[in-house]
Amino acid sequence: MRFYSTNNRKLRSPLQHAVLKGLAEDGGLFIPEKIPQLSAEFFTSSMSLSFQEISFETLRPYFEDDIPVDILQEIIKGAFNFDAPLVRVDDKIYGLELFHGPTLAFKDFGARFMARVMSYLIRNSDDELTVLVATSGDTGSAVANGFLGVEGIKVVILYPSGKVSEIQEKQLTTMGNNITALEIKGVFDDCQKLVKAAFVDKELSQQMQLTSANSINIARLLPQSCYYMYAYAQLKDKEVVFSVPSGNFGNLTAGLIAKKMGLPVRMFVAATNINDSVPRYLESGRFEPHPSHQTISNAMDVGNPSNFSRMLELYNNDIDAMRKDVHGVHFTDKQTRDIIKQVHQQYNYILDPHGAVGYLGVKNLEAKSPNNRNGIFLETAHPAKFLDIVQPLISEEIKIPARLQQCLDKKKQSIVLSNKFEELKSFLLS
Ligand SMILES: *Cc1c(COP(=O)(O)O)cnc(C)c1O
């Protein structure tokens, strides 16, 4: 399988190039040259397969030309070594819990799979690969954790000093091994600028193999299709709606790909906080990105979602076709807080602020076109990650999962640097 750029269908690249570069030369995002169809039989027999088996069938057509199938199987086993259970919350509403991985957020699926694919693709290279990531909080820990202990790869995370939550900082700075955390005296934008400067620096690119492993990497996107398939297999019922709490829309795009592969999905809800560029596009037909606004579902504070170009490509720029599959809606922080409270009182289920937006999405669609369908919202993070927001809303004490507690008990290890590029450069060269 080859991958083309969303800016140019003629520019096709093999897997190795698409994964190690991340972004196409013309600035576009890579997308598979065709979306393979899974057999109707798969969707009936998949009911009895395990999550790893379903994932293998889902990913195989994209990777089998470049990665031997037995190795692909090993990669999936290693990456998806935790469950994605479908939990009933309300009569017809289910949460697909995607937070059972090491960093308690759904980004573990993509990051862990991508890390293992990269490690395989560089197996014959003598140079160590250095992954540079700037993070405002969650992405950094999922990416770093994905690469933890992966041979031939070193990870350097840049995060803004004093600008991430205590839990996030602990997650970033306690991994050790092949992961180094750089605490930058500045804001997130400084971290991002430093990373960008490193990628265009001639001397650095001669001396070392640098890659970004950022969220738009195709090897992070595709594995996210697997849990949609698995949710369907767990539900054992035909009519399903998925509500996806969205920021950069990678998660939703992976769902759309699963549908194109044959998964019988009635409708997707693109549920956002007040950063609502995509819901507004679906309503008005105009895409008008804006600077992001801060909210309590902060992993979705994105004004210019990077995967929007992939969504357009999947629908051939046909907005009416997209509207048939995707319903857009946004919610305020107040609505989000209220629903966390209400769902806990009524159903004894603790939503995190992102999953809460997803839950509201299911309810919104149900109110617009009532027909008694199963609604699945993606619960993208464990509520303990957002303790300061969720705990005051509910009476019950939120239990901190052991894997999070473990890292909270460890000692922070970081290297403090200024926001000057020369300092980063000499660190990387040393
Ligand atoms: C990243 C993230 C999202 C948004 O996912 P996208 O793929 O960027 O739309 C939602 N919830 C949580 C907890 C996240 O970390």
Image (cartoon, rainbow, N blue to C red):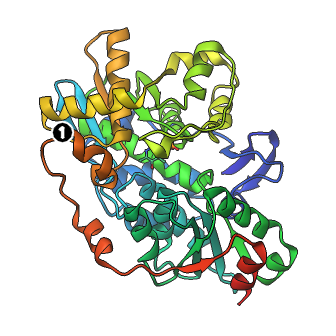
- Circle 1 residues within 10 Å: few <14, some 14–19, many ≥20: some
Q: Can you name the residue that lies furthest to the bottom here? A: 430
At which x and y percent is residue 313? Answer: 68, 32
Viewer-side residue, 387 vs 244: 387
In the displayed structure, 179 sits above or below 186; it is below
- The amino acid at mark 1 is Tyr
Quarter placement of the C terminus: bottom right
Tell me where residue 103 sits by quadrant: bottom left
Viewer-side residue, 8 vs 173: 173
Q: Is residue 24 left or right of residue 217?
A: right
Element class at badge 1: loop
Q: Is residue 430 left or right of residue 221?
A: right
At which x and y percent is residue 278? Answer: 58, 27
At which x and y percent is residue 195? Answer: 70, 65
Q: Is residue 121 left or right of residue 150?
A: right
Residue depicted at x 53% and y 41% = 301
Q: Is residue 152 left or right of residue 326?
A: right
Mark 1 highlights which residue? 349
Viewer-side residue, 82 vs 260: 82
At which x and y percent is residue 405? Answer: 26, 69
Residue depicted at x 22% and y 67% = 402
Tell me where residue 419 sits by quadrant: bottom right
Residue depicted at x 69% and y 19% = 286
In the displayed structure, 128 sits above or below 52; it is below
Res. 358 visible in picture: no
